[in-house]
């Protein structure tokens, strides 16, 4: 079983002077899976990714990467690639020159290293001969991913790879990561975008204050949170409100009221519309409500979570941790 | 414990040439690291891709030729620069004028731009982590960057030397060069000494380049780090103009930028030159080692790293200050520790020698019967100030009365010179008459007016004891 693990961390601790960046973090990443790290700013995500890339060493705990125990050497083990705090690119070189120079570092020519192929994979073929100086953040992210791909990694570590990506770029990146995982590469990525994590990751670890407050499958995290807030748009709002109020387990929230009066999370993020209803309910109660609406001849035009399940769970978990830290 | 205090067993076995090595903690395979040669090529690609480096290379390989050729064709020559007054006479004066200018301005600035930025640019671009993940050895990154910076600096220095030589030879020609003691150097001899002079200037250049590495590592993105070589060079130049004891003067790393002029006397004043070269090389080695030490201890996890001021002082500044103290002590043990090195006897000997050689040149210009230095038996009586103060040290109040004899003439010829002696031993002798000998800048020759070699001339006084000159 151990050989299937790309990362096995036990009780990892890391301090920077008086600041505790990581405090007893456990992490297991299976090969061929995409693993998400989430947490508020300063939670320790980048520090943990830096340890995986060999940019720092842990003060305590044990870390195995690709089956090899990591010692106190400041260098990434073979088979590990990626970036933290944004990709490292040289603005005076073109995209192709950046990759060719990197390939030459490993003793490969542009053809054998597959420079054109990785440029194609991340959708930068058209700008391959443009200097990186003029690249947008999204293009830089994609070029950084291409640089990591050149190393043919067995563990790919990416810090906020979706920052600045347009939908097309996002599609490229998701495609690349999914293909890599399918080929057996373990991918560890951090992101603030819950839609990314939901779309890509099979498992997540939520970090807060340097500790792992949740580790497990994404579905488990979403389910762990309990009732969610849903936005409900129907053909007959008064009837819908009446039916919702009468359904056991369903609580009608007033979407027109400010968030603090209904308790978080309830901001619909949409213009306040009396025709819209916000209800808080667990999934079984919501099913009952929908059935009642249909039976009453009320058409359901929209029923969506106000906040994604993952985001809701994230906010709940990290808010609790923050309050504990404040105390 | 922080990331800056980790052990780095990966750096202890760099001889593995990029193959797997053994981690000292558990005998487990460590990362496969990139050989220094590849990392060096990577650094060169990055350096050469910068427009300012390309511009500097182009400028260093073309501008000196244009400058020397242009100045050589002007009526007014840069007589305040060593060998500037001979730019009309020989193409070999051009590269020496350029060397004087380079030691003062060009080389400190060039080393600042190249080595002062070689580490800081990664801080500015935020690419340290990328580089560390790619190369997997901080020590190899340092070696590659230092070698790439050195390569570009050498390319620039070679450009200055070759371009100025080409400009001089094409504009003026391959003529003999008048040395700093007035003797004529055949073109081949002049070429060799010009090459040696530029080679010797590499030692202080390397010292400045190493200081650039140190500043770049210690101070990160701070402009002070980038400007460190230029600032140090400026401070050294100011120090060389002060009336410092000769032991302190020779212990400063920029002294070889001045002492190369000792190659242009006969015999050559080699001791100050060799001391200057040795001091420059020791500075280069020590500053590079300190930069490496600081680099291996830096925190690569902090993207906003701007160096640690305290560490820069304790690891960077204090050892170099200690080196100055040790060097002063060593040199003081072999010479007069408090003297200026410029004594009355040395000045008289130098002026008499130069006059004898230049008189022979003037004799040739005037188509008079040739005389030898032995026949002339030139002597000089030099006094400083009103003669009541100490007859030593730099100043523009030296006055020399030169006497000589001609075969078959009973009278002793005499001429007067006012001397402006600089702290580094270089002097300008300004003829004060008689007009027919050294009082006018032209001499009337059968072929027309020609520059009078005895009117004004440059000379140098060796600051360390040297054997008496020939002739």
Image (tube, helix red, strand yellow):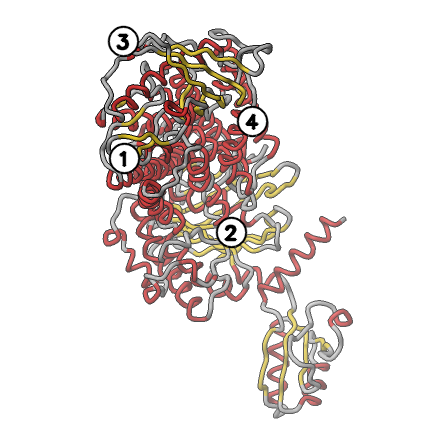
Inter-mark Cα distance, 4 to 2: 32 Å
Upstream in the sequence, badge 3 or badge 4? 4
Find residue B92 and report its horizontal and vertical position in percent. Answer: 29, 32
Residues B284 and A131: in front is B284
Is the same chain shared between marks 3 and 4?
yes
Q: Secondary structure at mark 4?
A: helix
Res. B397 mark: none
Marks 4 and 1, how far apart in space? Answer: 60 Å
Query: Which mark identifies residue B448?
Result: 1
Q: Nearer the viewer, mark 4 or mark 2?
A: 4
Q: Position of residue B385 (x, y in %)?
A: 57, 16
Q: How many marks?
A: 4
Give the residue at mark 4: B317
Sequence-earlier tag: 4 or 1: 4
Identify the residue under disc 3.
Answer: B408
Which is in the foreground here, disc 3 or disc 4? 3
Horizontally, is B331 left or right of A177 in the view?
right
Q: Which picture quadrant has residue B275? A: top left
1 and 3 marks on the same chain: yes
Question: Disc 3, disc 4: CB below 8 Å?
Answer: no
Asked if residue B161 can be seen in this view, the reply is: yes
Res A16 → quadrant: top right
Pointer 2 residue: A85
| Mark 4–mark 1 CB contact (< 8 Å) | no
Q: Residue at x 30, y 10 (%)?
A: B409
**What chain is tagged by disc 2?**
A
Q: Secondary structure at mark 1?
A: strand
Comparing A8 with B267, the one in front is B267
Front in this rendered view, residue B359 or A246: B359
Q: Is residue B259 above or below residue A41?
A: above
Nearest the viewer among A34 and A43 is A43
């Amino acid at each position: 079983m151990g050989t299937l693990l790309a990362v096995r961390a036990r009780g990892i601790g890391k301090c920077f002077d008086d600041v505790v960046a990581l405090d007893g973090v456990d992490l297991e990443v299976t090969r061929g899976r995409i693993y998400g790290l989430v947490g508020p700013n300063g939670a320790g995500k980048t520090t943990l990714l830096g340890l995986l890339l060999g940019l720092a060493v842990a003060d305590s705990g044990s870390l195995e990467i690709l089956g090899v125990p990591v010692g106190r050497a400041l260098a990434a083990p073979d088979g590990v690639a990626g970036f933290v705090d944004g990709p490292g690119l040289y603005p005076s070189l073109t995209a192709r020159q950046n990759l060719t120079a990197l390939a030459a570092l490993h003793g490969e020519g542009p053809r054998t290293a597959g420079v054109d192929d990785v440029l194609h994979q991340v959708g930068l073929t058209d700008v391959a001969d443009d200097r990186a100086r003029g690249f947008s953040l999204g293009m830089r992210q994609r070029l950084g991913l291409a640089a990591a791909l050149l190393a043919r990694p067995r563990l790919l570590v990416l810090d906020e790879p979706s920052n600045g990506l347009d939908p097309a770029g996002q599609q490229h990146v998701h495609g690349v990561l999914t293909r890599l995982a399918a080929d057996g590469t373990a991918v560890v990525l951090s992101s603030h975008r819950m839609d990314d994590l939901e779309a890509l990751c099979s498992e997540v670890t939520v970090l807060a204050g340097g500790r792992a407050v949740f580790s497990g499958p994404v579905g488990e995290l979403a389910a762990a949170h309990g009732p969610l807030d849903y936005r409900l748009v129907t053909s007959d709002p008064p009837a819908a409100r009446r039916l919702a109020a009468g359904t056991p387990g369903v609580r009608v929230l007033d979407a027109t009221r400010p968030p603090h009066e209904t308790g978080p999370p309830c901001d619909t993020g949409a213009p306040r519309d009396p025709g819209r209803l916000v209800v808080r309910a667990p999934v079984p109660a919501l099913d009952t409500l929908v059935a009642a609406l249909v039976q009453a001849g009320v058409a359901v035009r929209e029923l969506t979570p106000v906040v994604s399940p993952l985001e809701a769970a994230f906010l709940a978990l990290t808010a609790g941790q923050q309050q504990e830290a404040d105390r | 414990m922080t990331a800056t205090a980790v052990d780095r067993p990966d750096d202890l076995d760099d001889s593995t040439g990029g193959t797997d090595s053994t981690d000292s903690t558990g005998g487990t395979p460590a990362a496969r690291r990139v050989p220094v040669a590849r990392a060096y090529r990577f650094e060169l690609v990055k350096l050469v891709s910068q427009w300012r480096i390309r511009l500097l290379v182009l400028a260093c390989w073309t501008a000196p030729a244009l400058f020397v050729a242009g100045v050589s064709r002007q009526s007014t020559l840069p007589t305040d620069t060593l060998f500037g007054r001979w730019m009309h006479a020989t193409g070999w004066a051009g590269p020496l004028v350029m060397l004087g200018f380079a030691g003062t301005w060009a080389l400190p600035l060039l080393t600042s731009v190249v080595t002062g930025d070689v580490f800081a640019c990664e801080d500015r671009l935020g690419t340290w982590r990328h580089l560390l993940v790619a190369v997997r050895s901080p020590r190899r990154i340092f070696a590659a960057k230092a070698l790439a910076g050195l390569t570009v600096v050498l390319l620039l220095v070679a450009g200055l030397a070759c371009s100025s030589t080409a400009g001089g030879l094409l504009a003026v020609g391959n003529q003999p060069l008048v040395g700093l003691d007035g003797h004529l150097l055949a073109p081949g001899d002049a070429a060799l000494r010009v090459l040696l002079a530029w080679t010797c200037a590499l030692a202080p250049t390397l010292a400045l380049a190493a200081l650039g590495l140190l500043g770049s590592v210690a101070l990160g993105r701070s402009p002070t780090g980038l400007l460190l070589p230029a600032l140090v060079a400026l401070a050294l130049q100011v120090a060389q103009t002060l009336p410092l004891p000769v032991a302190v003067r020779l212990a400063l790393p920029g002294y070889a930028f001045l002492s190369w002029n000792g190659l242009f006397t006969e015999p050559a004043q080699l001791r100050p030159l060799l001391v200057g070269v040795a001091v420059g090389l020791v500075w280069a080695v020590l500053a590079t080692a300190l930069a490496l030490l600081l680099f291996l201890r830096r925190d690569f996890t902090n993207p906003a790293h701007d160096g640690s001021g305290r560490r820069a002082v304790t690891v960077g500044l204090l050892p170099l200050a200690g080196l100055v103290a040790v060097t002063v002590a060593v040199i003081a043990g072999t010479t007069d520790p408090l003297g200026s090195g410029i004594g009355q006897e040395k000045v008289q000997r130098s002026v008499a020698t130069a006059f004898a050689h230049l008189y022979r040149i003037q004799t040739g210009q005037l188509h008079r019967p040739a005389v030898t230095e032995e026949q002339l038996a030139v002597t000089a009586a030099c006094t400083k100030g009103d003669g009541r103060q100490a007859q030593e040290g730099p100043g523009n109040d030296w006055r020399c009365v030169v006497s000589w004899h001609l075969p078959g003439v009973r009278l002793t010829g005499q001429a007067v010179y006012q001397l402006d002696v600089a702290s580094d031993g270089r002097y300008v002798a300004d003829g004060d008459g008689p007009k027919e000998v050294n009082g006018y800048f032209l001499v009337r020759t059968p072929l027309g007016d020609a520059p009078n070699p005895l009117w004004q001339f440059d000379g140098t006084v060796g600051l360390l004891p040297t054997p008496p000159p020939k002739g």
